[in-house]
Image: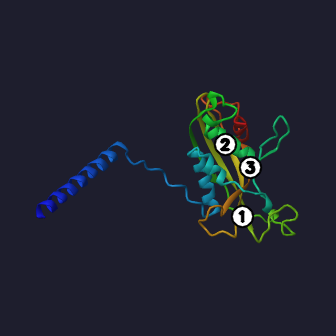
Amino acid sequence: MNERCNNDFRAVCATAALLALALLASSCEDPITLTAAPEPPPASAEAFVTTLAKAYQQADPELFRSLLANEHGANADYHFLLSEPTDLGETQWDYSEEARIHLRMFRPDQADPPLLSDLWLQSLQITLTPLEQFQERPEFYSADSGADGKLDAKRWRAVRARYFTYVLWDLAGTDYKVEGEASFVVIEDLTKTTGEAGKFLLLLWEDLGRRFALDSQISSESSSWSQIKALYR
């Protein structure tokens, strides 16, 4: 009886050793891949602009889309106001067009129709510097709980500030640089707690035009953020 128990014990030990070796070999062949932690939701209007810059730095279309207001039933509809009308007379773009433009800009391999190879992004530098503090803007609030197409002040708080914008697109072809100003209207969802996704959203992005110097390495064909975006339509 004791000999049979000893044999059984040796068999169990041998099996355990084989399993341990198999697990060790597997771990060597399939190293663990660590993924970056998701960007935490911004906790203020100022932090929101920092996150917007990170979406550009990281060329992340999903993060960019998550920052845009897109709740039509609450009159929270994002718009980008161009610095000057397009050849077709357009003065603004909505959420769908902005999302499409940035998908093409940040994920050119997914562009449909295909994007010109010269426009493929190699790297990007961006600095957004406040020119003033965010101030509440009551003109965005509705006088009749949203029936007039404006924001319900019981649900939203709207603030606005101007920023100096510096962006350098390092592309496969010609590089582009923008130095100008932009106005951001950020809305706060009063039904959400600080740190919750969607607490702060971009309602209005107005391109106020350029204030920059050309150099021989930078194309003069595009001089505003509006025109750069137009390349990716």
Q: Is residue 53 above or below residue 117?
A: below
Quadrant including the C terminus: top right
Check the image and report above or below for 105 versus 14: above
Confirm whether residue 133 shows in the render. Answer: no
Decide which of tag 1 and tag 3 comes sooner along the chain: 3
Looking at numbered disc 3 in the image, what kind of residue is underneath it?
Answer: Tyr
Residue at left offset 57%, top offset 40%: 124
Q: Which residue is mark 3?
A: 95
Residue mark closest to the camera, 1 vs 3: 3
The residue at 85%/61% (across/down) is 149
Cβ–Cβ below 8 Å for labels 1 and 3? no
Give the image location of residue 15, x and y in percent: 24, 53
Residue 154: x and y, percent? Answer: 77, 72
Residue 38: x and y, percent?
53, 55
The local secondary structure at tag 2 comes to helix
Q: Is residue 30 visible?
A: yes
Q: Quadrant of the N terminus?
A: bottom left
Which residue is depicted at the point 20% across and 55% down? 11
Count of labels in the image: 3
User: Which residue does the numbered mark 1 point to in the structure image?
Assistant: 135
Does residue 112 appear left or right of residue 56 in this picture?
A: right
Say which mark, if any, is on residue 102. Answer: 2
The residue most toward the left is 3
Q: Earlier in the sequence, mark 2 or mark 3?
A: 3
Q: What's the amino acid at mark 2?
A: His
